[in-house]
Image (cartoon, rainbow, N blue to C red):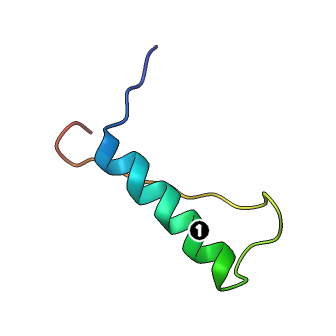
């Protein structure tokens, strides 16, 4: 099974991760960020 993620969502995930780190809401690499594309399911 192959999943492809759009550049829009890649940027959103990275930006969200950086913001979580900046606000000290994560420790190291612990945690998850999820996204759901309602157009593709």
Label 1 sits on residue: 18
- Residue 15 vertical placement versus 34 (above, below): below
Residue extending farthest to the right is 28
Q: Position of residue 13 (x, y in %)?
A: 47, 56
Q: Residues within 10 Å of mark 1 (few under 14, many from 20)?
A: few
Q: Quadrant of the C terminus?
A: top left
- Write the residue at 51% across / 56% down: 14
Numbered-mark total: 1
Image side of residue 32 versus residue 28, left or right: left
Residue extending farthest to the bottom is 23
- Residue 20 vertical placement versus 29 (above, below): below
Residue extending farthest to the top is 1
- Write the residue at 55% across / 58% down: 33
Image side of residue 36 versus residue 2, left or right: left
- Residue 34 vertical placement versus 6 (above, below): below
- Write the residue at 44% across / 16% down: 2
- Name which quarter of the figure residue 30 lies in: bottom right
Could you say which is closer to the camera, residue 12 or residue 2?
Answer: 12
What secondary structure is found at the residue carrying circle 1?
helix
- Residue 37 vertical placement versus 15 (above, below): above
Q: Position of residue 6 (x, y in %)?
A: 31, 38
Image side of residue 25 versus residue 5, left or right: right
- Name which quarter of the figure residue 17 lies in: bottom right
Q: Position of residue 4 (x, y in %)?
A: 37, 27
């Amino acid at each position: 099974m192959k999943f492809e993620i759009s550049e829009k969502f890649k940027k959103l995930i990275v930006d969200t991760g950086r913001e979580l780190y900046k606000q000290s809401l994560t420790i190291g690499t612990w945690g998850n960020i999820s996204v759901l594309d309602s157009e593709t399911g």
